[in-house]
Image: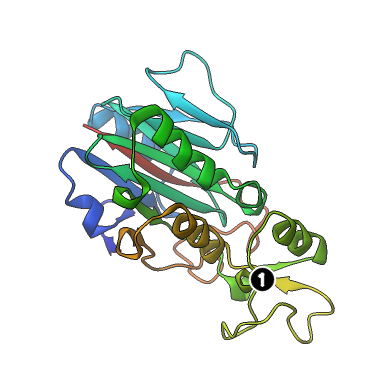
Amino acid sequence: MIESKCPYLTVPRLAAVPGLVHGFGEARWSEADFLAFAALNGFRPVIMRQLHSDIIHRIDGAPVKKLEGDALITNIPGLLLVIRTADCLPVLLVDEEKQAVAAVHCGWRGTEKRILEKAVKAMVEAYGSKPAETRAALGPCIGPACYEVGPEVRDRFLHAGFPASIFVERGRLPAIQVPNLKGRYLLDLREANTWLLRELGFKKTNIFNPGPTCTHCEPRLLSYRRNSADPRRMYNFIGLL
C-alpha cells in the first residue's frame, strides 16, 4: 500500500485497473473532505447505515434513501461505494473483466455471518463474476495481537465452520487459547476473511494485504478500541469511472 498526496491509501495493483477509483481513508480525512473529493471527481457516494449484518445491496442507480446493511455491489459507473470503519475490516472487490466492484464491511459479527462470501456470491449471480479472476483488497483493521474476544465469539466462529487457526497467540504462533488471558482469545479478522476468499477459489496472488495493517497500533488510523469516545470513522471507497 502506498500513500498518495490525498489522505487515503491505495493498492498499486488496483490503481492500475483502468477506470477504477479506490482507497482506504486515514484519520485525517474528514467526512466533509471525503464528500468534497467525491463531488470533485463526479461521483455520487453510496453510504449505508452499517448494522454488522450480512445484508448486501445491489446498486443499479443512486439510492433515493439511505440504505441499511454492510455490503454494496455495482457495475454502474459514477457511484462510489463506501464502507466506514474504525477497527473493522474493509474489503474492496474488483472484477475487471465484468466491470463490477463491491465494498464489504467485515467486523467480527459480519465475518462470522460470512458476509464477504455472500458478497462474492452476489457478484457471481448478478454479473457472472468468477472468484478465480476477481481481486480483493483487505484494508487496515485491528490486528490479532490487539483484538481480544471472549469464548462465546470463538464458539460462534467454530460453529460457523471457520478453522481454529484464525485465533492466534501473541507472536502469531498457532494456538486456540492464549496463555495468561484468562479464557480469552485473539481473533485475526484478516485471516478469517482471507480463508473465506481462498475457500471460494480466489488466487493467492489476487488477495492483497498491504500495510499498515493494525488500526489499534497505527496513530494515523482510527481505532474504536483505542478511543471509543471518538465518533469519527475512516472512509473506504471503490467506484467505476
- The amino acid beneath tag 1 is Ala
Left/right of residue 91 with respect to residue 39 in the rendered view: right
Rendered position, 185 above or below 173: above
Which residue is situated farthest in the top direction here?
A: 64
Rendered position, 167 above or below 174: above
> Can the viewer see residue 37 in this picture?
no
Q: Tell me the quadrant of the picture where the C terminus can be found.
A: top left
Residue 194 in percent (x, y) is at: 48, 61
For image coordinates 50% across by 27% down, the residue present is 57
Q: What element carries label 1?
A: helix
For image coordinates 65% across by 54% down, the residue present is 108
Which residue is situated farthest in the right direction here?
A: 182
Rendered position, 7 above or below 165: above
In depth, the one of 2 and 189 nearer the eye is 189
In depth, the one of 219 and 172 nearer the eye is 172
Residue 116 in percent (x, y) is at: 51, 46
Task: Judge the density around disc 1: few (<14), some (14-19), many (≥20) Cα neighbours within 10 Å.
Answer: some
Residue 11 in percent (x, y) is at: 28, 57
Residue labelled with disc 1: 164
For image coordinates 66% across by 71% down, the residue present is 164
User: How are the residues colored?
Assistant: rainbow
Answer with the quarter of the image where residue 13 lies: bottom left
For image coordinates 25% across by 52% down, the residue present is 14
Left/right of residue 41 with respect to residue 92 in the rendered view: left
Left/right of residue 115 with respect to residue 159 in the rendered view: left
> Can the viewer see residue 192 in this picture?
yes
Number of marks drawn: 1
Residue 173 in percent (x, y) is at: 59, 86
Q: Tell me the quadrant of the picture where the N terminus can be found.
A: bottom left
